Amino acid sequence: MRKIQFAEDQFYHIYNRGVEKRNIFNKEWDYFRFLTGLAEFNTTASVDLKLLLEDKYKNWPSTIIKSKIWKEGEGLVKIHAFCLMPNHYHLFVEQIREGGISAFMHKLAVGYSMYVNKKYERVGPLFQGPFKACLVDNETYLTHLLRYIHLNPVDLIEPNWKKEGVKDWKKVIEFLRSYKWSSFHDYDGKSTYPNIISKEFLFDLLGGVKGHREFLQAWLLKDIDEIQDLTFE
């Protein structure tokens, strides 16, 4: 039994990684397939996996997340932020209906695992057990977690940034703008994933694009201590 009980209108950090820390995303197409799941499985309606193979998805990534196959008002969660890394993912979600997180994550994990196992002709579990979840119950967690998620890809260019700090912010911001697999873009003035992200609450809280960017660059080494229980470290 999962210790945490999900409740409506509460925020949660959801994360998981590959079994034995193996990659869960091997090619660009894999990232797009997971992103499609974030959009299409966030619904009370049943989703036929075959629909994800219809013509509108044959042009990935040009049409990715620009349309969806379910109607408005059927959502299970609000996804306020996300980041996909080669061997793990982070989601910052708010449950908006009873059982929403459990239903959404079940469809997301099963759908993506089936895709990977079929594509790569593998068997067995893809993820390191059930997804991890932490309640985000104060404003410190709320804001620091958003920053942590959007800075997560910095691991790929400055592996020690969490211990030593960011050495070159200009380089980091340029890299984050080039990194496709994060909601950073939507908080940086673009509408990259309109059918995934619900950014209004945190975007307004931080003061828009300028406020978000300044908040990222105000990262201090002690900030990791604020969210230690919400990370893989």
Image: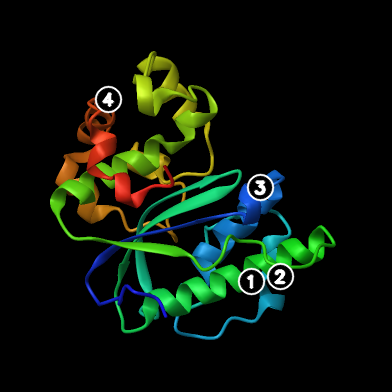
Q: How is the image coloured?
A: rainbow
Residue 186 in percent (x, y) is at 38, 44
Q: Is label 2 in a helix, a strand or a loop?
A: helix
Q: CA distance from mark 3 to mark 2?
A: 15 Å
| Amino acid type of the residue tagged 3 in the rendering | Asn
Q: CA distance from mark 1 to mark 3?
A: 17 Å
| Amino acid type of the residue tagged 4 in the rendering | Gln
Q: Residues within 10 Å of mark 1 (few under 14, many from 20)?
A: some
Residue 9 in percent (x, y) is at 22, 72
Q: Can you tell which mark lies on residue 184?
A: none
Q: Can you tell which mark lies on residue 23?
A: 3
Asked if the residues shown at circle 1 and circle 2 are in contact, with their CB atoms under 8 angstroms apart, the answer is yes
Q: Can you tell which mark lies on residue 114?
A: 2
Asked if the residues shown at circle 4 and circle 3 are in contact, with their CB atoms under 8 angstroms apart, the answer is no
| Residue 97 visible, this orientation | yes
123 with respect to 8 (left or right): right
- Lower position in the chain sequence, tag 4 or tag 3: 3
Residue 17 in percent (x, y) is at 55, 53
Residue closer to the observer: 63 or 4? 4
Q: Residue at x 40, y 81 (%)?
A: 74
Q: Is label 1 in a helix, a strand or a loop?
A: helix
Q: CA distance from mark 4 to mark 3?
A: 29 Å
